[in-house]
Amino acid sequence: MLDKLVGLAMLVAATFVFLYYTIWTLLMPFVDSDHPLQNVFPPREWAIRIPVVLIILGATVIGTFLSMVMIKSNRKKAAKAKAAAKKKA
């Protein structure tokens, strides 16, 4: 039951973020700059900066994870090769 509740919360959060960003980027450029609704959204340049920063951060995390996995895998292979060489000698 808890997993369904967490899934529902994640779905609601993702839907809210999607709708907020869509309204901010696609609809707000057509609204007058003095309209009170403009105060709900940050400046438009952040509509590009935020996703770019998130993509760079995500790529960095994924690259770091892959590097760590490859380094650990390489160490295991080297240890196995060293153990096999000791057995033969």
Image (cartoon, grey):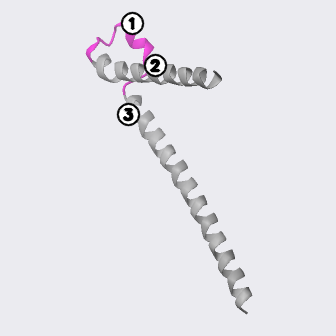
Instruction: Say whether residue 64 is left or right of residue 2.
Output: left
Mark number displayed over residue 16: 2
Furthest-top residue in view? 36
Mark number displayed over residue 48: 3
**Residue type pointed to by label 2:** Phe
Picture residue at 44% right of the left edge, 13% below the top: 40
Picture residue at 53% right of the left edge, 24% below the top: 10
Could you tell me how many numbered marks the image carries? Answer: 3
Furthest-left residue in view? 30
The kind of secondary structure element at disc 2 is: helix
User: Which residue position is annotated with label 1?
Assistant: 36
The kind of secondary structure element at disc 1 is: helix
Q: Are marks 1 and 2 in contact (CB under 8 Å)?
A: no
Furthest-bottom residue in view? 89
| Mark 1 surroundings: few (<14), some (14-19) or many (≥20) residues within 10 A | few
**Residue type pointed to by label 3:** Ile
Q: Earlier in the sequence, mark 1 or mark 3?
A: 1
Picture residue at 39% right of the left edge, 29% below the top: 47
In the rendered image, the vertical position of residue 6 relative to residue 77, given as above or below: above
Q: Is 83 contained in the magenta span?
A: no
In the rendered image, the vertical position of residue 61 relative to residue 37, given as above or below: below
Q: Nearer the viewer, residue 63 or 69?
A: 69
Q: CA distance from mark 3 to mark 2?
A: 18 Å
Q: Report the span colored magenta.
A: 30-44
Q: CA distance from mark 1 to mark 2?
A: 20 Å
Q: Earlier in the sequence, mark 3 or mark 2?
A: 2
